[in-house]
Image (cartoon, grey):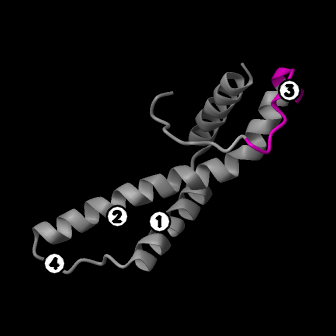
Amino acid sequence: MSKFQIDIDFSNIDLASLETEEDFQREAKTLLPKVLVKLGESVGDKTWEELQQKLQASGGKLKSSPSEKRKFIQETGRTYQRNASNREKQELEEYIVDQLRQQKH
């Protein structure tokens, strides 16, 4: 799943305790909400930069305050988390399981 480029924080996970498929699935479900927000925030960051470039190219005024950018990115992350389709959630869950397996080995 190369379309996901997210750094997932595994520091609070006891990887040694993950033995069965159910263990991996359960941990992936626990991580999913935070990962969805992170993915949405990365989309928001990219969108913000593209909007700023388009505004600049058209001679528009840039909204470049750090607080406005941070607010936009955070809201995009929350919106993505709320509106992600079941298919997206399932694919992301599978990606998290793969990442957990890699971290364990």
State the residue at coordinates (81%, 22%).
21
Q: Which of marks 3 and 1 is in front?
A: 3
Mark 4–mark 2 CB contact (< 8 Å): no
Q: Earlier in the sequence, mark 3 or mark 1?
A: 3
Q: How far apart are marks 2 and 3 (CA)?
A: 40 Å
Residue on which disc 2 sits: 48
State the residue at coordinates (20%, 63%).
53
Residue on which disc 4 sits: 60
Name the spot of residue 35 as percent of width and height, x first: 62, 48
Name the spot of residue 91 as percent of width and height, x first: 59, 33
Classify mark 1: residues with Cα within 10 Å, few (<14), some (14-19) or many (20+): many
Q: Which of marks 2 and 3 is nearer the N terminus?
A: 3
Q: Which amino acid does label 1 sit on?
A: Ile
**Left or right side of 43 for 30:** right
Q: What element carries label 3?
A: helix
Mark 1–mark 2 CB contact (< 8 Å): yes
Q: Residue 16 carries which label?
A: 3
Mark 4–mark 1 CB contact (< 8 Å): no
Mark 3–mark 1 CB contact (< 8 Å): no
Q: How far apart are marks 3 and 4 (CA)?
A: 54 Å
Q: How far apart are marks 4 and 2 (CA)?
A: 14 Å
As for residue 64 lying within the magenta part, the answer is no
Q: Which of marks 3 and 4 is in front?
A: 3
**Left or right side of 59 for 61:** right
Q: Which of marks 1 and 2 is nearer the N terminus?
A: 2
Residue on which disc 1 sits: 73
| Segment colored magenta | 11-21
Q: Earlier in the sequence, mark 4 or mark 2?
A: 2
